Image (spheres, helix red, strand yellow):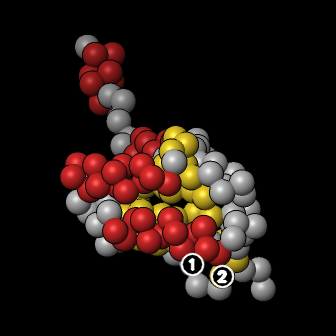
Amino acid sequence: MKLRSLRIETQPQLMIIPMIDIIFFLLVFFMMSTLYMVEQHTIPVNLPQAAATRQDKPNSINITVLENSNIQFNQEEIPLTLLAKRVSLELNKQPDNIFVLRADKQVPYGQVITVLDGLKQAGAHRVSVAVEKARE
């Protein structure tokens, strides 16, 4: 009889605080590891530098003017004459799109202004110009 009463008195206890610590550690580990798995799919362009920069929004559309003056609309090469049509199609799908103009610094200024003018004529009101942050 005495053996049975000892077993009842020494039941194992479930400690929940160490379990919460382990779960929190795993959560932080997976959050940090997924930050390094994000891959940016953009065309490498040698951008000019500016002191005041801002990151583009996730719902942005990249328009890239390459060094040889070719225009790419989200990694698809298009002629300048079709740029206005593509911009208006994107604005019909989602009117709050932001168009990010990325131009190589070797591209003539007039070519960049021509592309910017084409964006404005197609109805793009939210246009930003991509630059690299200047090194101090």
Percent coordinates x, y for residue 92 in the rendering: 21, 52
| Label 1: few (<14), some (14–19) or many (≥20) C-alpha neighbours in 10 Å | few
Give the left or right position of residue 28, taking residue 42 as reference: left
Q: Which residue lies under the disc numbered 2?
A: 50
In the foreground, 61 or 134: 61
Rendered image: mark on residue 23: none
Q: Which residue lies under the disc numbered 1?
A: 53
In the foreground, 50 or 78: 78
Give the left or right position of residue 65, taking residue 76 as reference: right
Residue under the point 54% across and 73% down = 113
- Residue 2 in view of the camera: no
Specify the farthest residue to the front: 81
Amino acid, disc 2: Ala
Which quadrant of the view contains residue 136? bottom right
Residue under the point 57% across and 78% down = 53
- Residue 79 in view of the camera: yes
- Residue contact at pointers 2 and 1, CB within 8 angstroms: yes
Amino acid, disc 1: Thr
Q: Is residue 136 above or below residue 12?
A: below
Percent coordinates x, y for residue 56 in the rendering: 47, 65
Q: Is residue 75 above or below residue 119?
A: above
In the foreground, 86 or 3: 86
Which quadrant of the view contains residue 94? bottom left
**Helix or strand or loop: what does disc 1 sit on?**
loop
**Helix or strand or loop: what does disc 2 sit on?**
strand
Mark 2 and mark 1: Cα distance apart in space: 7 Å
Percent coordinates x, y for residue 91 in the rendering: 26, 56
